[in-house]
Image: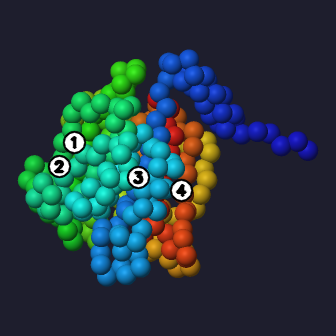
Amino acid sequence: MTRQANPIYIFRSILTLILLYMVFLGYGQDIRVMTYNIRYDNPDDGPNAWTHRKEKLCGLILRELPDVAGIQEALYHQTTDLLKNLPAYELFGVGRDDGKQSGEYAAILYLREKYERLDGGHFWLSAAPDLPGSMGWDAACTRMVSWVRLRQQETGFTFFVFNTHFDHVGEKARIMSARLLKKMIKKIAKGERVILTGDFNCDIGSKAMKLLQRGKAGLKDSRRAANNVTGTPFTYTGFSTSGKPGNIIDHILVPEKAVVTDYFIPCDSQDGYYFSDHLPVVVKVIF
């Protein structure tokens, strides 16, 4: 008995081929996106401290060469190390504690020669989003969002990138953060194309992530939408390759009309350790 092909899969494949052809002709735009929690520089990490892994981590980013990347947990000196080792990129971000250089960044990297930053800003995941360092609800620490509006130099194509890091303790904080983030995306982007990256500290089926995907203004999970999914089935690792992996808590969300051709979780390691306690996520999106 012959097995019938899934019509949804066939439709997706045909649509992807059409869009790839449009990209080839210059009518479509494909963007390579990464999200990566690089782990803050903690001296107690011993052999996994930043000084021992920064070059390998930057080498991974260079190999994947994303157009844009949302980076979480970077301290100020780590952002300078990233720029030193990734000279093709610009970095946009501030420290979450004071809106300047203190505390972790939810920074955005983008290719300097390919994109121009038209606008950008930051807000905090709290009841006072304009107040640097403000803490929200039952969160264990300050959380924030950085965003940019980019224009592709060659074509004039524009889109927004929002990058965040949700709280690792407070479930209410994650839910309220999702509500605020969705509201702010609508207010700032005004219906323009949006890519959302982040360490959300929860899986895609959680209430917080469902809120971001719900309704007309909702975004979709790039993993579920992708035509081709490769790599590990987890993003949290705790550094060791022999430890018990966690769930996929690092996500890239895209507009409903965008097509995700590829979704990849690289699992590079050396001597039994990954380059961060999280793995990056890389996707190829076609608008």
Write the residue at 35% across / 70% down.
51
Of badges 1 and 3, the one in the foreground is: 3
Where does label 2 land, which residue? 123
How far is mark 4 from mark 2, CA to CA? 28 Å
Earlier-in-chain disc, 4 versus 1: 1
Local packing at callout 2 (Cα closer than 10 Å; few below 14, some 14-19, many 20+) is many
In the rendering, which numbered label is found on residue 35?
A: 3
How far is mark 4 from mark 1, CA to CA? 28 Å
Q: Nearer the viewer, residue 256 or 162?
A: 162
Does the CB distance between marks 1 and 3 fall below 8 Å?
no
The image position of residue 6, as x and y in percent, is 71, 39
Left or right of 180? Residue 18 is right
Of badges 4 and 1, the one in the foreground is: 4
How far is mark 1 from mark 3, CA to CA? 20 Å
Where does label 1 land, which residue? 184
Q: Amino acid at mark 4?
A: Ile
Earlier-in-chain disc, 1 versus 2: 2
Local packing at callout 4 (Cα closer than 10 Å; few below 14, some 14-19, many 20+) is many
The image position of residue 107, as x and y in percent, is 28, 51
Q: Is disc 3 placed on a helix, strand or loop? A: strand
Where does label 4 land, which residue? 265
Local packing at callout 3 (Cα closer than 10 Å; few below 14, some 14-19, many 20+) is many
Local packing at callout 1 (Cα closer than 10 Å; few below 14, some 14-19, many 20+) is some
How far is mark 3 from mark 2, CA to CA? 19 Å
In the rendering, which numbered label is found on residue 268?
A: none
